[in-house]
C-alpha cells in the first residue's frame, strides 16, 4: 500500500479471526464491482491461469476452476481427501462438478445476498450449490496451479472438520427442502 498509494488497496483487520468463509462474505460488502473472486498472495496460480479464468467473466454467473492434472508437490493424502470431498458434495447436492474449492468467480451481489454462514473452506461448495439450486449459470475452466512452497496445509484440523460438516449439512438440508417443497 505504501509502495503504490495510487492503487485502491484497503486493509481491513478483524479484531479476532473470523475464518476464511466469513471473511470472504464480509469482504464482498467492502468491495466494488460486479464480479468477485479471491486471488491468493502465495503465487499458486500463474498469471496465465488467472487470465484464462477472467476471460470468462460476463458469460456466466459462476466461473469454476479445476485442475485436470495433479498439482506438483501436493501430498497424495491431500489429493485423495480433495477427491473424496468432491464426491461427497456431488452426492449430497445432486450435481456433478469437478471441483468445489478452486476459488470460483461469483457475482458480488450473489455473495452478499447468499453469504454462507460457515467459517472454513466448505463455504465455497455451500455457495456454489446454493446458487446452482437457484438457477445460476456456470462454466468449469481447466487451469494449472502450483503447490505453495511455504507454510503448512491446515485442512485436517478439528475446527475445519466441524466447518466442512456444517457446510455439508447445509447442502443436504437444501436438497431435502428442494425435494419436499420444490425449491431450495
Image (tube, rainbow, N blue to C red):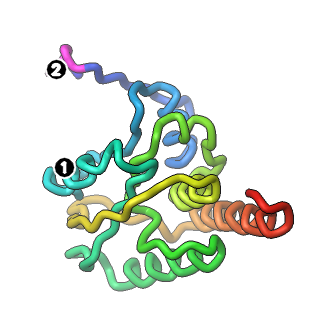
Against 11, residue 80 (above or below) is below
Q: Residue pushed farthest top?
A: 6
Which residue is rendered at x = 30% and y = 63% of the image?
Answer: 141
Main SS of the magenta part reads loop
Say which residue appears at 14% left-offset and 50% top-offset: 47
Residue denoted by label 2:
4
Tell me, yes or no, whether the highlighted magenta stretch contains residue 91: no
Q: Residues within 10 Å of mark 2 (few under 14, many from 20)?
A: few
In the image, is residue 15 above or below residue 174? above
Label at residue 14:
none
The residue at which mark 1 appears reads as 51
* Position of residue 134 measured from the top left corner of the image (x, y, whole percent): 63, 53
Region of the chain picked out in magenta, as a range:
2-7
Q: Residue at x 57, y 58 (%)?
A: 132
Mark 2–mark 1 distance (CA, rounded to whole Å): 22 Å
Query: x and y percent of residue 110 in the render?
Result: 55, 40
Mark found first going from the N terminus, 2 or 1: 2
Number of residues whose C-alpha sits closer than 10 Å to that of mark 1, classed few (under 14), some (14–19) or many (20 or more): few
Q: Quadrant of the N terminus?
A: top left
Amino acid at each position: 500500500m505504501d509502495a503504490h498509494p495510487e492503487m485502491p488497496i484497503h486493509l481491513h483487520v478483524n479484531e479476532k479471526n473470523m475464518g476464511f468463509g466469513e471473511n470472504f462474505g464480509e469482504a464482498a460488502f467492502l468491495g466494488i464491482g460486479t464480479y468477485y473472486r479471491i486471488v491468493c498472495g502465495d503465487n499458486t496460480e500463474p498469471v496465465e491461469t488467472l487470465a484464462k479464468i477472467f476471460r470468462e467473466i460476463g458469460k456466466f454467473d459462476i466461473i469454476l476452476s479445476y485442475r485436470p492434472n495433479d498439482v506438483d508437490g501436493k501430498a497424495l493424502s491431500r489429493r485423495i481427501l480433495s477427491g473424496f470431498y468432491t464426491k461427497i458434495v456431488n452426492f449430497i447436492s445432486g450435481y456433478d462438478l469437478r471441483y468445489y474449492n478452486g476459488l470460483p468467480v461469483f457475482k458480488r451481489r450473489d455473495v452478499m445476498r447468499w453469504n454462507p454462514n460457515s467459517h472454513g473452506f466448505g463455504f465455497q461448495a455451500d455457495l456454489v450449490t446454493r446458487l446452482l439450486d437457484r438457477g445460476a449459470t456456470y462454466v468449469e475452466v481447466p487451469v494449472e496451479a502450483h503447490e505453495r512452497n511455504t507454510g503448512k496445509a491446515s485442512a485436517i484440523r478439528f475446527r475445519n472438520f466441524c466447518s466442512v460438516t456444517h457446510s455439508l449439512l447445509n447442502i443436504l438440508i437444501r436438497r431435502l427442502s428442494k425435494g419436499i417443497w420444490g425449491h431450495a
